[in-house]
Amino acid sequence: MTKDEPHLPHGLASRAEHNLSALKTMSTSDKIEEVLVALRRVIRATDLHSKKLVKTASVTGPQLLLLQIVNAKGDMTISDLARDMSLSQATVTTILDRLQKRELVERVRSDTDKRKVHPRLTDHGRKILSTAPTALQDNFVRRFRELDEWEQGMIIAALQRVAEMMDAKDIDASPFLDVGALDRAIPSG
Amino acid sequence: MTKDEPHLPHGLASRAEHNLSALKTMSTSDKIEEVLVALRRVIRATDLHSKKLVKTASVTGPQLLLLQIVNAKGDMTISDLARDMSLSQATVTTILDRLQKRELVERVRSDTDKRKVHPRLTDHGRKILSTAPTALQDNFVRRFRELDEWEQGMIIAALQRVAEMMDAKDIDASPFLDVGALDRAIPSG
DNA sequence: GCAAATTAATTAGAGAACTAAAGAAAAATG
DNA sequence: CATTTTTCTTTAGTTCTCTAATTAATTTGC
């Protein structure tokens, strides 16, 4: 978003094509630079999108994530949820408070163990969830669908690879931090 | 889901080959599912990394981002910074306040236009910056470097493509992925 | 030249997210 | 039954983020 750098959708496409052929003559350090820049762009873009989402969906990012997880997995405890979201219990409690106040979620105490609390979506919560996150992905999905098969395949393979390299990093590079959370770094959604 | 697979550093390349061939017989909707899952994994991983970083770097995500931008581009105004970070001026001002109180940054008023303020890194700020974010990327970079050339190229091209599809989406209406925070998450490594 | 409009940054006020630490209640242990 | 552990909530404090109102400096129009 600098003044001199126009960020036009067209320019981007042709730049990618150009890069594709240029990649072959590129030094390793240049490639590393490229991959990091591209990665940041992806992260940046998702970041902006999630912000935008929050405005349209009437729930915040963490709130939506909570709803999604509760919806996907059935009866869970607060600690389960905290682990899944990589947040502290206390944080989950407060997020839950707000969602409960808006009646998107209710708390059900366990019969077998009365310390435990099972968050459950209300009808309203389910409705929010069903409208919000599908609209979310539509645009990317539409574009992805339009790609050639080979390109779809390439993108999937590459993203899996990147995810893999990052997951791995988490595991063997953790100096003193708890690794437990990382085991379940990927919620099945 | 990908978690039960053994994840061996050497096996990486051959597994990619395998995935690549499996992709050819995959339905479009399966592919879409795959790409979204992979994307979430990537985002998730970077999210966790940025959290971890914050603990070691003694600055928060937005604070680090600010330092990075100020470092990269020279004299900028608060509004430039706000635009670059996709935040409001007011938000940037308060983040800057905190950084200034810790003497990582100083404010220099412009000579030519005294309304303008140029944030500048102090030595201490530069030092924080130089230690913090490199550690983040190191691991990914190391792994990336070990890949075959064709695979490096593939990953770069794919990420660029994805970023492109997301950038473009920015312009037309609807939003996209969820994922909490990252908030302000840090687009690094 | 000077009043009016614009621009740049700050301040004020408020909601949300986050954490650590302490507390309360229930269950498990011995 | 007393102690310990587990599970969740509360509390207190920081940060992030926004909008709206404010102050200061510059530019524009007459």
Image (spheres, coloured by chain):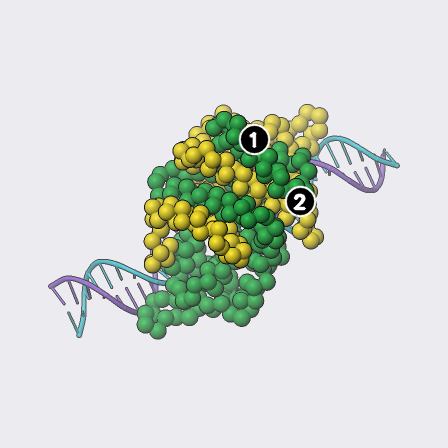
Chain colours: A yellow, B green, C cyan, D purple
Q: Nearer the viewer, residue B29 or B184?
A: B29
Mark 1 chain: B
Q: CA distance from mark 1 to mark 2?
A: 20 Å
Mark 2 chain: B
Badge 1 and badge 2 both on one subunit = yes
Q: Nearer the viewer, residue B121 or B101?
A: B121
* Callout 1 amino acid: Ala
Task: Give the percent coordinates (x, y) of residue A15.
Answer: 39, 49
Label 2, secondary structure: give it. Answer: loop
Rendered-image quadrant of the N terminus of chain B: top right
- The residue at 35%/43% (across/down) is B171
Task: Give the percent coordinates (x, y) of residue A98.
Answer: 52, 38
Density class for disc 1 (Cα within 10 Å; few <14, some 14-19, many ≥20) is few
* Callout 2 amino acid: His
**Side of A78 relative to B157 (left or right):** right
The answer to whether residue B122 is visible is yes
Residue B145 versus residue B169 in the image, above or below: below
- Residue B10: numbered disc: 2
The residue at which mark 1 appears reads as B22
